[in-house]
Amino acid sequence: MSVYKLIQYSANGQTMRYPLLNKFNDSYKAGASRERVQRPGLYGLLSVLIFGSVACSDQPPEVVTIDDSIKTSEASKSATSLVLWYDKPAQDWMSQALPIGNGRLAAMVFGGVDEEHIQFNEESLWEGGAGEWPAYEGGNRPDGHRYLPQVRELLNQGKFEKANELAQEKMSGQFLGEERSSDGYSYYKGFGAYQPFADIRVALVDQGEASEYRRELDLEQGIVNITYTARGIEHRRTVFASYPDRIISAQFSNTSERGQDYRIGLQSLHQHDIQWSEGRLRLVGALKRNGMKFEASLDIDAPGASLSFSDNALMVSGAKELQLTLAAATEYQAVAPHYKGRDFAADNQQVLDAVETLDFDTLLARHQEDYKGLFERMYLRLDGSDAALSNLTTEQRLQRYRSGAADPALEALFFQYGRYLLISASRPGSMPANLQGKWNDRLNPAWASDYHFNINIQMIYWPAEVTGLGELQQPLIEYMDRLREPGRKTAKQVFGSPGWVVNTMNNPFGYTAPGWGFPWGYFPGGAAWLSQHAWQHYAFSLDEQYLEQRAWPIMKEAAEFWLHYLQTNEQGELISSPSYSPEHGGISKGAAMDQQLAWDLFNNIGEACNVLQDHQSFCDQVAKAKSMLQGPRIGRWGQLQEWAEDRDDPDSKHRHVSQLFALYPGNQINLEATPALADAAKVSLVARGDGGTGWSIAWKINFWSRLHDGDKAHQLLRRLLRLTNEKSIKYGESGGGIYSNLLVAHPPFQLDGNEGGTAGMAEMLLQSHAGVIALLPALPTAWPDGEVKGLRARGGVQVDIIWRAGELVEARLLAQRTGSYRIRVGKTLSTVTLTAGQPYLYRL
Ligand code: FUC
């Protein structure tokens, strides 16, 4: 490859509507205006691939000076408003209450008239670990590695069942048993589960009948509002979670002459005490099984009102305005092996003291400045929804949509909701979002509301980079960085290997062993998959210091495991053994997903090597291993094989479609470079059908987008957005759907479905995985007119697009680095030179 010169982006004084790229951590910021010589990586240049049948033109499209020619249309403005609203209080936590969060704290707001109920969580309140099980060792069987050669030998002899039995007995992880409840949910003893924290209940004495009731979540403002009139008195509540101030804040106001009476209580499902002193209501508790201590502290401010404390509740009499400020913390600390030690009471006090003198409006303004700084980086308008639709509640709109009516603006609302939820559940400094983000009201949430690394948590982060929220991946990347320590132990003890691993299920107490359930728990590929996220943050941000200091060590150590784990077969190819295709079939050798994960990791390491120009011998070793990997195989019915053996069942409708990892989120298979494999992937996808759990349907939106079939992707989106009320665990055809609060149902609620759906919609509008920036690659006929601003392409390019009658009108590209870029619209491929920081208007 040729060597060329790049000048890194330096701010040029020009006012940008959107901030350029987001970086995790100031200490990793690359110096501006640094000159360096660099070999072009896939995303660095985006111009070096060979394109099959795509028509190429070397003529750059027309260049138009930028004068804000992309304008926001006024059309159908109200139908496109980014508000979820309802005309009744929520009765049900999962399907109706409205979520707020600041990354660390999360809450569900019910909006009752006689009683406001705010159920809340703090991210670190977890049962499980050494506190519950003194002999807990991250689930590892220390002798597991001794049996690995035998398991491999059995697989070599084709004795798959025997190999499964042995691996199950000797290598699978440990726990203390399962407690099943009648509704199908389980508690996994020793492993633990994410816990609900407590509930704020504010009873409004003497309300009578309410009229003009409205409960809304305003995504543009990042707040929940409740308004109604009762006995001629207007009531208004606003609730939000603030990241800068680390609190949840609620204001209750009313127009009553003498003020309103409120009774305020804090309650928890866990053992606790309530204390009242100096304007603060405190709930101090400890978990039953592992003893983890926690405290919630609620500041209560009601100017002019009288306060009295009795029966564990606070009576506030005659308040025209009531302000509640909540801080909550636990003793959890992310340090092995005990994972505790934080002075949570001092933490809460510090948080509340810091905001004591600030009034509600100031807190709100600080929250909104922070929140909007993220949310407003992107804008999406899908035209075609009648303005009158804004008179329908969100639930009515979903009902209408379910009966077949079109509502592109509702789809755009769903898209932005995914961004809202990610902003609420994952912020720099927080833990990563878990299966339910940070929202949970149960002692035994489904799958422990844990960190599942065989698709789920990765999917939650799919939309982060492309929708302009790259720094929200920081919690995931910091988390995997910390996971390396327990992950090394598992690699050594269970696999006799260097490097680090994590398997299917993980808790914040370093459970990196294969899960106890076999074979579903077996998935050493977890770390390789996570490493993709470490790389992708670089691919979008081009932050070299981050790549060198944060991503590289994580990726390198994950690759060390794979270099050791892969076995050479008789044909001299490298294959994974034992290998498992999540959660389908038993263990075997060379399952497609493992092969693709290893390829993806090695490929990204190759890209990183080009950037860092260091680590030569390791880079050579990885490149060699990559070239020896057994590649994707096309089977007897034209399918992309899920296993090394050609044994795919054309009738299987299994929700995991792991053999298509290479199509999305990987890029080993793509329409440009590997059309035959893309065709095979399509055959497999068609056979699997359109059903599945929420996340499975969401994944299929992304697959079809990568296959550039916008109408099919949209059909899947419609399927995902089918209103449901199902809350018990369902798979397959009866899975998927959306609740009236727009949370996606596995069922039950799992955040991956929301985020995978948002990522899929982004993928319909912009793709950049194959060395080309594809504009509107999978635009469905259902979205004839629209506009999007602030999407991000790999290689540090920000993209705005406007389209009419299904055709691109114009796009604005803002590159972070000067260079040559390939742009594709339909079959037209152009090469353009983008200048760092200079918007470029592209027209066909
Ligand atoms: C995987 C999936 C299940 C569920 C669980 C949390 O195991 O197969 O459907 O989403 O994760």
Image (cartoon, rainbow, N blue to C red):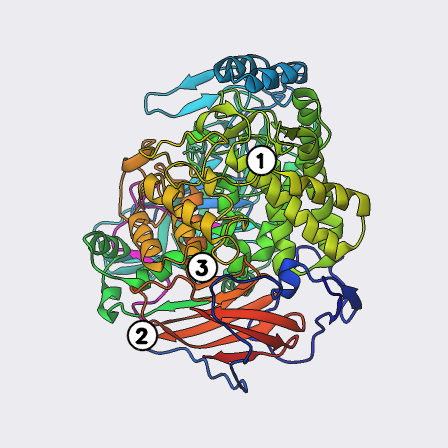
Element carrying mark 3:
helix
The numbered dot on residue 246 is: none
Residue behind mark 1: 526
Is 477 left or right of 280, judged from the image as shown? right
Label 1, label 2: how many angstroms apart (C-alpha)? Answer: 43 Å
Can residue 638 be seen in this snapshot? yes
The numbered dot on residue 762 is: 3
User: Three-letter amino acid code at disc 3?
Assistant: Ala
Q: Position of residue 125 (x, y in %)?
A: 55, 33
Task: Determine if the magenta segment contains residue 96.
Answer: yes
Magenta span: chief secondary structure? loop
User: Three-letter amino acid code at disc 2?
Assistant: Ala
Q: Position of residue 424 (x, y in %)?
A: 50, 51
Residue at point 42%, 45% (across, down): 680
State which region is magenta. 75-101
Label 3, label 1: how many angstroms apart (C-alpha)? Answer: 25 Å
Residue behind mark 2: 805
Quarter location, residue 554: top right
Is 710 left or right of 134, judged from the image as shown? left
Say if mark 3 contacts mark 1, CB within 8 Å. no
Is 679 left or right of 463, judged from the image as shown? left
Task: Determine if the magenta segment contains residue 370.
Answer: no
